[in-house]
Amino acid sequence: MRFPAIFRLNATEIVNGGSVMTNFVTLDDFDHNLLMRVRRNNLEPARVTAEAVGLSESAVLRRLRRLRAEGVIAADVAVIDPARVEPRIVLHVQVEMNTQDRKVMDAFQRAMKASSEVQGCWDVTGETDYLLTVAVRSMQDYEAFGIRELVPEKGVRGFKSMIVIREVVGFDPARAVLARRTVRTTAR
């Protein structure tokens, strides 16, 4: 069984005796320091990063290329503040399915991936089968989403909605702690 929260779909996979395992990348202290900096600002000039982490500029660029090639750095993106672009209502939705049939679950997941309102979708344990983060312009738009996607015909038994009043700690991938399986290195 794979748990999406801990199994990286974009990580290299190794098949071992029929089971799929993630091929983890070994990172040294320099790599961890580089990742810490690019998670906060991936537009920082290489010369500034090099000085901060104690490597040459070419070594920084070479390591960043390797980290991208190995899938450790999965994307270089701009984080947009949606509140500055248009008004929206954010809701967290707990979805309970009426079946655990794989075809129904797969179809639901495809529908969530295709829905522009869905900002995040997690397959979770417990009484709830899925946790969604949904963003809409109005409650009428949320109602339309619910009528379209959260119905028994799509395998949904029921759902509970929680409207976000205010964001206390926003989603920030840079807050995630990276495990340190340290390999000491002196090579620069």
Image: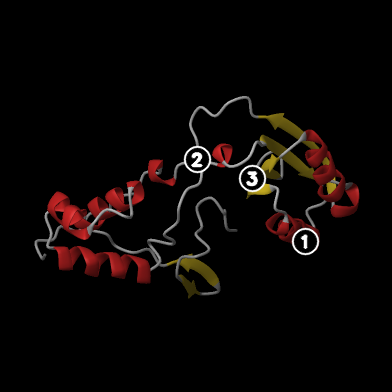
- Residue in view at x 58 percent, y 42 percent: 85
Amino acid type shown at disc 2: Phe
Left or right: residue 109 compared with residue 120:
right
Label 3 close to label 1 by CB (< 8 Å): no
Is residue 86 or residue 27 the one in the foreground?
A: 86
Q: Residues within 10 Å of mark 2 (few under 14, many from 20)?
A: few
- Residue in view at x 45 percent, y 52 percent: 78
Q: In which quadrant of the rendered view does residue 73 lie?
A: bottom left
Marker disc for residue 27: none
* Helix, strand or loop at mark 1: helix
Left or right: residue 162 compared with residue 19:
right
The image shows residue 84, relative to residue 6, as above or below, that is above
Spatial CA distance of label 3 from label 1 is 16 Å
The residue wearing badge 2 is 171
Which quadrant is home to the C terminus?
bottom left
For discs 3 and 1, the disc positioned in front in the rendered view: 1
Q: Residues within 10 Å of mark 1 (few under 14, many from 20)?
A: few
Left or right: residue 36 compared with residue 158:
left
- Residue in view at x 44 percent, y 46 percent: 173
The residue wearing badge 1 is 107
Counting residues from the start of the chain, the first of labels 2 and 3 encountered is 3
The residue wearing badge 3 is 124
Amino acid type shown at disc 3: Val
Amino acid type shown at disc 1: Ala
* Helix, strand or loop at mark 3: loop
Spatial CA distance of label 2 from label 3 is 18 Å
- Residue in view at x 66 percent, y 37 percent: 88
